[in-house]
Image: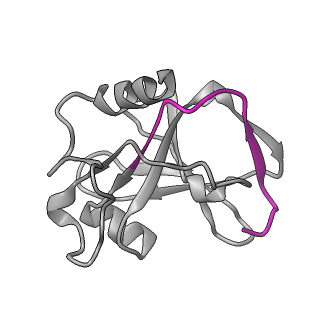
Amino acid sequence: MCGAVRYRLTEEPLTLYACHCTDCQRHTGTSFALSMIVRREALQLVHGEPRAYAVAVPGPPRRGKFCGECATRLWGEPARFPHIVVLRPGTLDDTTWLDPVAHIWMRSAQPWVSVPTGALTFETQPQDPMALINLWRERRAR
């Protein structure tokens, strides 16, 4: 938000989805979170040094990076998948192209949220962790 930390992506993201789970609602302070999965190697810091955060929740703590100046959350670093980061795509300079491949955890979605007609939805987490990545690849191949 303040520009103290700048990064660049050197390759296409693996996927982009909207998560409506209650954890994402609480963490963002709004109705859902956009999550962009990128390979860790594709994320390059250009300026500044983000600070680390850890949130104690049931299971392993959720870790990631945020701007130490304005506290904008930049990305998460899932312990189970150390080769990826979960980028908050609202921190990109250009967000006009963002179009989630799916909406997950719809059973927790706020009742007033409107999902685009025809959008792929999941009541909870997709059973296959590759499902959202495959959806992105299919869309990009068209």
Q: Is residue 63 visible?
A: yes
Vertical placement of residue 121 versus 33, above or below: above
Vertical placement of residue 14 versus 93, above or below: above
Give the residue at x 14% y 51%.
123
Residue that protrudes farthest toward the right in the picture: 47
Give the residue at x 33% y 59%.
116
Q: Quadrant of residue 45?
A: top right
Give the residue at x 24% y 74%.
110
Give the residue at x 45% y 55%.
34
What colour scheme governs how the chains and residues are painted in the rendered image of this protein?
A: one colour
Vertical placement of residue 3 versus 47, above or below: below
Q: Quadrant of residue 40?
A: top right
Decide which of 98, 84 is in the foreground and name it. Answer: 98
Residue interval drawn in magenta: 1-17
Magenta highlight on residue 34: no
Q: Is residue 74 visible?
A: no
Q: Position of residue 55 (x, y in %)?
A: 41, 59
Q: Is residue 58 left or right of residue 79?
A: left
Magenta highlight on residue 8: yes
Q: Is residue 75 left or right of residue 6?
A: left
Q: Position of residue 63 (x, y in %)?
A: 47, 49
Q: Position of residue 37 (x, y in %)?
A: 49, 37
Q: Quadrant of the N terminus?
A: bottom right
Vertical placement of residue 90 versus 13, above or below: below
Residue that protrudes farthest toward the top in the picture: 141
Q: Is residue 126 left or right of residue 69?
A: left
Q: Position of residue 104 (x, y in %)?
A: 26, 50
